Image: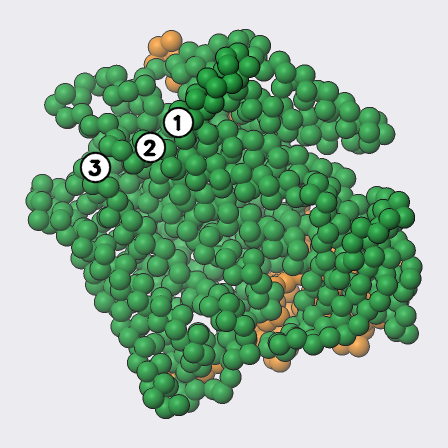
Chain colours: A green, B orange
Amino acid sequence: MPGDLMAAFSIAELGHFALVLALFVAIAQSVVPLVGAHRGDAAMMGMARPGAVALALLVGFAFCALMYSFIVSDFSVSNVFENSHTDKPMLYKISGVWGNHEGSLLLWITTLVVFGLAVALSSSNIPPQLRARALSVQAMITVGFLLFILLTSNPFERIDPAPFNGRGLNPLLQDPGLAFHPPMLYLGYVGFSMAFSFAVAALIEGRVDAAWARWVRPWTLVAWTFLTAGIALGSWWAYYELGWGGWWYWDPVENASFMPWLIGTALLHSAIVVEKRDSLKSWTILLAILTFGMSLLGTFLVRSGVITSVHAFASDPTRGLFILLLLVVSVGGALVLYAWRAPQLKGGGLFAPVSREGALLLNNLLMSTATATVLLGTLYPLIADTLNLGKVSVGPPFFDGVFVPLMVPAIIAMAIGPMLAWKRGDLRGALGRLWMAAGLGVAGMITVWLMRGGAVGDILASFGIGLAIWLFVGTLMEFGDRIKLFRAPLSESGRRARNLPRAAWGMTIAHAGIALIVAGVTASSAWKGEAVQTQAFGETVTVNGWDFTLLSAETFEDENYTGVRGTFRLSKDGEEIALMTPEKRTYTAPPMPTTEAAIHTTGLHDLYAVIGDPTADGKAFVTRLYFEPLVPFLWYGSAMLCLGGLVSLSDRRHRVGAPVRRRETQAAPGAKPARA
Amino acid sequence: MTRKKRRLTLIGLGMLLLSAATALVLTAFQDNLVFFYSPSDLQTKPLAADQRFRLGGMVADGSVERDGQTIRFTVTDYAASTPVVFSGILPDLFREGQGVVTEGRLNAEGVFQATEVLAKHDENYMPPEVSDALQRTGKMPNTMTMPDSTPQTGS
């Protein structure tokens, strides 16, 4: 219908136009409120709010325009032609918007301005100066990315004449898990931009205090929660979609999302110290800068294709260069500002090494060290290649070898830290209260080890399980202590639990989630059972006591793919548990095969079956069967992390007024914080 | 505890962690760096016996032979070739005439025993090592879709 086509034409063009307008708004936004804050000009500072709204509307419109082009399959837009197809289900037409470089960049910018909007509209207890400065800094980042998208990666580029149909989306990406993975990840990555903007604003202002930390923490928490969800979704997707039964490969692109997570976790914890104790200020600012730096680095690694990765998509070096430039300018500029201004940020409360602050600092040190080692391992192939040391790859053994020893003390300390008092803690007292956690941990370790047959090779993994138990029980005991469980009447405990700050609930849930993840990681890496074979019809293969019988295999057809579906009978001790139907699909647009594993979960373990190619006579298939112990714990644990983040976010102190900022004239160096 | 003493404790702890991390990184690097070679490299560069490495190039046309789960194929950079044997299910995107990266060891007969064949998400993607190796031998096939081969656009 020509009328529709005309409408589609103008909509894509309008989207492009909106982006250009947004660039000019962002340029104004990055200058006017900043100057206003410097001069104390309320009218100029007042520009920040409507500016943020205008930016969000313009970029949001552009994003909707691109989505519209995908939904109506407007193949005159080159991006739609490259990544969509009329036969594609609606969900994947929509997720196709961000399933490619240009569109995902537009999603990046959309997230960026939405965060700006949220800060602009959030409760008005942020001082106008700080808000104006933070929104200006946020707008500067937006300018950089708008230039990037308009100059190198225009999602609205047109083709004339329009092709009849598109090339389709990479079938691996046609999956509900992956439809939501990039937006989650981006909300996380980009969310850290808010902490960055607040940090730079505070540096410009030359002041960081408890109130500042209280404004920054919710934004960090939001970003961290989304990033956690994004990483978990990606991992889950890799687990069921790639057909290798693995959930983490230490692949550069995975690392790219994991590094901001690690250092963001450090930021989340150090911001608590700033808020409660007015200490570790300049360190927290540095972490805020570095966390967003890692997000930008992650974007660079994924989008530039400089590093060999299973994720690497076809890419363009000039784009990589542009992101690198953005990274250098924004993080470099922030660090210069930091070097200049940070010495003015006088530390507040003193504390002994053994104290809550000390434990949080230990978390920070371990998380930053872990980030640094992951960074080194990720970039080393690039460095070696540049220095002509040969082409190398750094694989999972390196990361396991470095990362695991760093996490062991972190997990031990994680149960103790919350038991310590602020300022000066009682380590012996805390350990005394954790006797049950330690006892159960050791008992669990020995039990698991004996159950596995007492082999030397199982000692380390059993230790991992022991650690998980220690952390889980320790976290619950700390919670029990707070609500006086079993030491006061249950009604009293219930009342205390209800009155406990949501942040404390959040911590308990998240820390317990980490314990589950530790158990899942340990068990699934150490005790995964695997069998690869040619399996004839009727033949049974046993993996760790589970019998997989290949019953049949038939070909079938669906909307946009054809495939072979195998049927396995899964049984244990002669009793049928389930029928499993793994598939091998061949998509029509683009023509590409994918593996759909069949997973049966007992809630504790997963059984995992993959069907491969038939033998020449067609009477047997190559099959791959896995026993995946405790893998579901990874997903439970990740869900608890996100839940913990959300619960903590709902803490009332983030909503009600933050403590009144001390007047500059009253602020004496080293003054007591407003509240402990 | 004074500010100065606290700072010293913190710096001390930080240094301790840093040196521990450095030690960990160095040991891990020593054992786990995997080098990349093309079939031509194998003829010119000396290899330590039993060294684990990555072999990359193109899967030679007509070279794939399947025998149950054992697969034999030849990796070539069009200047030299190396026979490879792999046991297991190949990644979905493994195809003759496409780029491939395998990891494993060379046995006494000069056959590369792969324990891993790396999967890619994108059919048009060629690992940079492979395209570099092919460019060095000047044998980059022009039928191969190269990164960013977007079609000519009208605007």
Q: Is residue A316 left or right of residue A521?
A: left
Tell me which residue sits at (51%, 67%) in the image: A91
Establish whether labels 1 and 2 are both on one chain. yes
Q: Residues within 10 Å of mark 3 (few under 14, many from 20)?
A: some
Position in image of residue A249 (x %, y %): 64, 49
Tell me which residue sits at (91%, 62%) in the image: A538
Q: What kind of residue is marked 1? A: Pro
Up the image or down, A392 lies above or below A103; here it is above
Q: What kind of residue is marked 2? A: Arg
Establish whether labels 1 and 3 are both on one chain. yes
**Earlier-in-chain disc, 1 versus 2:** 1
Nearest the camera: A8 or A615? Answer: A8
* Chain assignment, label 2: A
Look at mark 3 in the image and give the residue it sits on. A125
* Viewport quadrant of the N terminus of chain A: bottom left
Position in image of residue A336 (x %, y %): 30, 40
Could you tell me if residue B47 is visible in this image? no
Indicate the secondary structure of the residue bearing disc 1. loop
Indicate the secondary structure of the residue bearing disc 3. loop
Numbered mark located on residue A175 in the image: none
For the residues bearing labels 1 and 2, Cβ distance under 8 angstroms: yes
